[in-house]
Amino acid sequence: MVVEYSDGFFPAVIVLKTYVKKKFTSYSCNRKNVVWRDKYKCQYCGNKFCFIDLTMDHIVPKSRGGDKTWTNIVACCKRCNNRKGDRTPEEAKMPLIKKPNIPRWNIHVLLRNRQIPEEWKAYI
């Protein structure tokens, strides 16, 4: 059923009669999502950077069996990443600003980089 039309002709908002619920597991642990989760801040020095100036740092280095998981990866500036090197934060005497976590699902997060049509805003 159409709730609202766009330009008077095309459906902009519809109501579904049935909905197939899909279990959401997690966002992909990639650089874009890690930098977003950490709010564009280096998790060692606390400074804010542009996306291109941040890297992903393994808290437990890959050479020591550290995995690419949400709880082992943080956003890190290039300077701090070089300084930390192949050590843990404790060994490098570089404590983390906050413990990394797995981001929770949210419709606003899912649509964060998209232009949301005006007709949708009342329903999101």
Image (cartoon, rainbow, N blue to C red):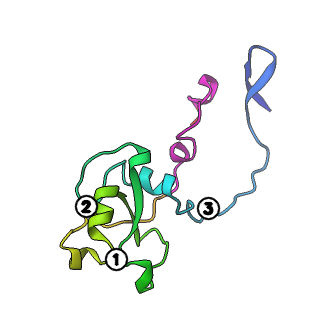
Three-letter code for the amino acid on which mark 3 is drawn? Phe
Q: Position of residue 66 (x, y in %)?
A: 43, 80
- The CA span between labels 3 and 2 is 31 Å
Q: Are marks 3 and 1 in contact (CB under 8 Å)?
A: no
Mark 3–mark 1 distance (CA, rounded to whole Å): 34 Å
User: In the rendered image, which quarter contains the C terminus?
Assistant: top right
The magenta region covers 105-122
Kind of residue indicated by mark 2: Tyr
Answer above or below: position of 29 versus 89.
above
Pointer 3 or 1: first along the chain? 3
Q: Which mark is residue 86?
A: 1
| The one of 102 and 87 positioned closer to us in this rendering | 87
For mark 3, what is the residue? 24
Q: Is residue 121 left or right of residue 66?
A: right
- Residue depicted at x 52% and y 41%: 112
In the displayed structure image, the side of residue 93 where residue 122 appears, left or right: right
Q: Which mark is residue 44?
A: 2
Left or right of residue 106: residue 75:
left
Please identify the quadrant where the N terminus is shown.
Answer: top right
Residue 81 position in % (x across, y down)? 33, 63
- How many residues crowd mark 3 within 10 Å: few (<14), some (14–19), many (20+)? few
**Residue 107 horizontal/vertical position (percent):** 55, 46
Q: Nearer the viewer, residue 84 or 4?
A: 84
Q: Nearer the viewer, mark 3 or mark 2?
A: 2
Asked if labels 1 and 2 touch by Cβ distance under 8 angstroms, the answer is no
Q: Earlier in the sequence, mark 2 or mark 1?
A: 2
For mark 2, does the 10 Å Cα neighbourhood hold few (<14), some (14 to 19), or many (20 or more) residues?
many
Q: Residue at horizontal 75%, vertical 56%?
A: 20
- Kindly report the distance in space between the C-alpha atoms of the residues bearing marks 2 and 1: 15 Å
